[in-house]
Image (spheres, rainbow, N blue to C red):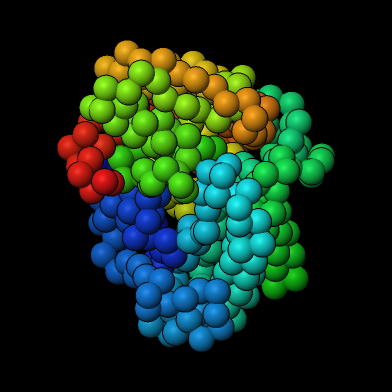
Amino acid sequence: MSDPSPLLGKKICVTGGAGFLGSFLVQALEQRGCREIFVPRREDYDLTTTSGMERMFADARPEVLFHLAAVVGGIGANRNNPGRFFYDNAIMGIQLIEYARRNPVEKTIVVGTTCSYPKFTPVPFREEALWDGYPEETNAPYGIAKKALLVQCQAYRQQYGMNAIYLLPVNLYGPRDNFDLQTSHVIPALIRKCIEAGQNGSRDIVCWGDGSATRAFLYAADAAEGLVLAAERYDGAEPVNLGTAEEISIRDLAETIARLCGYEGGIVWDASQPNGQPRRCLDTTRAEQCFGFRARTTLPEGLAATIQWYRQGAQRFR
């Protein structure tokens, strides 16, 4: 029988806990027996404001704090909202870490983004390369805003002894993802396009870029498990990647999703639109060594589960 989680009995706050990854994190915490989990919702706690942040801390009184809340989207959303994505993500995170310092928070877990890595980072991305260049232009404002929080966590650890850790999950996907074609990431967008094209009898679907960019993808339930393991076992100052070693080109990904969806039409690549970062795949050695995390869900397994979930509730997205 495994030892009880050190999170048991703790008052836990999960910003973004009603969102995609957050819902899986709350579920993973509940499965460990955690019962005092506070999930602030934006309509009640606007964390870009001082009043919203103060009210959240007063109501949650967290001993453990997970910061997942973010304003985020795919390449198009990043390109259309650079100022908003920079400000909202920076101000939320900076205020939250400062208020965690002021309050009796035992441990703060901040979720960053692989968009913070330099555009031409050697693959697989190692945490040491995080400062070796400027991020890919379309998502640089978002990536830099989130990377600033790593600096803050390390500075507060140095000056105040604050136990704040920083994790970098690779591209996430899975059931409950955002399937809005204006703001979604690549996997939910491709799934929706393929299924709707099949239903409508469309001859082809259009995808951005030329399909040459590569990505690695992490199933959201696996990512949530990684966050919990880090909260339980890791207290270091250095950032830690969460991901898999399954690198795949966007072209191969589109063809795989089309096959799994039963879509037999064509795929047209619009090279006038950006590819995003040329390659993205993480070195996950540190996560395995520091807190025993290794992703369990293969990409085909995760895609099949995500497609099934979308089909069962596709009317929600019309």
Identity of the residue drawn at 44% across and 84% down? 55
Identity of the residue drawn at 42% across and 77% down? 45
Residue 121 in which image quadrant: top right
* In the rendered image, the vertical position of residue 288 relative to residue 151, given as above or below: above
Identity of the residue drawn at 70% across and 68% down? 156
* In the rendered image, the vertical position of residue 144 relative to residue 98, given as above or below: above
Looking at the figure, which quarter contains the N terminus? Answer: top left
The answer to whether residue 88 is left or right of residue 145 is left
The answer to whether residue 260 of the structure is visible from this angle is: no
The answer to whether residue 195 is left or right of residue 165 is left
Q: Nearer the viewer, residue 180 or 206?
A: 206
x and y percent of residue 14 in the render? 41, 63
Residue 282 in which image quadrant: top right
The answer to whether residue 232 of the structure is visible from this angle is: yes
Identity of the residue drawn at 36% across and 43% down? 179
x and y percent of residue 202 in the render? 32, 23
Q: How many marks?
A: 0
Q: Nearer the viewer, residue 260 or 180?
A: 180
